Image: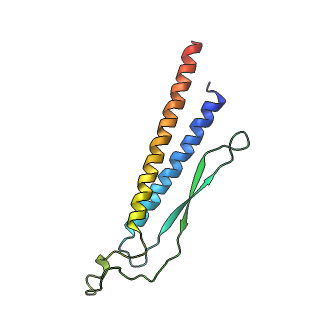
Amino acid sequence: MQSKDTMALDRISTSALGAQTRAVDDSAHNISQLNVRDAQVVRTRFESEAPPPRGTGGVRAQTELVERRSPSAPSSPFLSPELDESFVRDDVDIAQELTNVLVARRAFQANVVVQRASRAFMDATLSIGA
């Protein structure tokens, strides 16, 4: 049987893994909207859960639609109607989206380490009792 603290660590890190997965999905969606005329850009909003014993602890992520900053116009010069769709729109900040992916990746890695440590602690505890 797992200790209460080990179960909390596992539950909290699992919630963080889900939240970071949502963040990467949202960034991937935004990157896919780079040259879409009426891009629907989203952002990830993270909310912390109440810590144990009052709550489950951890974090959850929600996707929110971002209001458009500007009319859907290309940031590159307009050349011809045929090329209009090939230009990147100002609605999507590619540098910010790639930064979001890197931040989510590091957070994901950190939470995997927490899960591994939690499971190693549980295994060590069980082997002492055997």
Residue in the foreground of this view, choosing between 107 and 31: 107
Left or right of 50 in this view: 116: left
Q: Position of residue 108 (x, y in %)?
A: 47, 45
Specify the farthest residue to the top: 130
Q: Quadrant of residue 71?
A: bottom left
* Residue ID at (45%, 52%): 103
Q: Position of residue 121 (x, y in %)?
A: 54, 25
Residue in the foreground of this view, choosing between 71 and 103: 103
Q: How many marks?
A: 0
Name the quadrant of the C terminus: top right
Left or right of 36 in this view: 57: right
Above or below for 127 versus 61: above
Specify the farthest residue to the right: 54
Q: Position of residue 53 (x, y in %)?
A: 72, 39
Q: Quadrant of residue 1?
A: top right
Residue in the foreground of this view, choosing between 110 and 67: 110
Above or below for 116 versus 77: above
Residue in the foreground of this view, choosing between 124 and 103: 103
Above or below for 116 versus 57: above
Q: Quadrant of residue 45?
A: bottom right
* Residue ID at (44%, 47%): 106
Left or right of 113 in this view: 51: right
Above or below for 28 versus 88: above
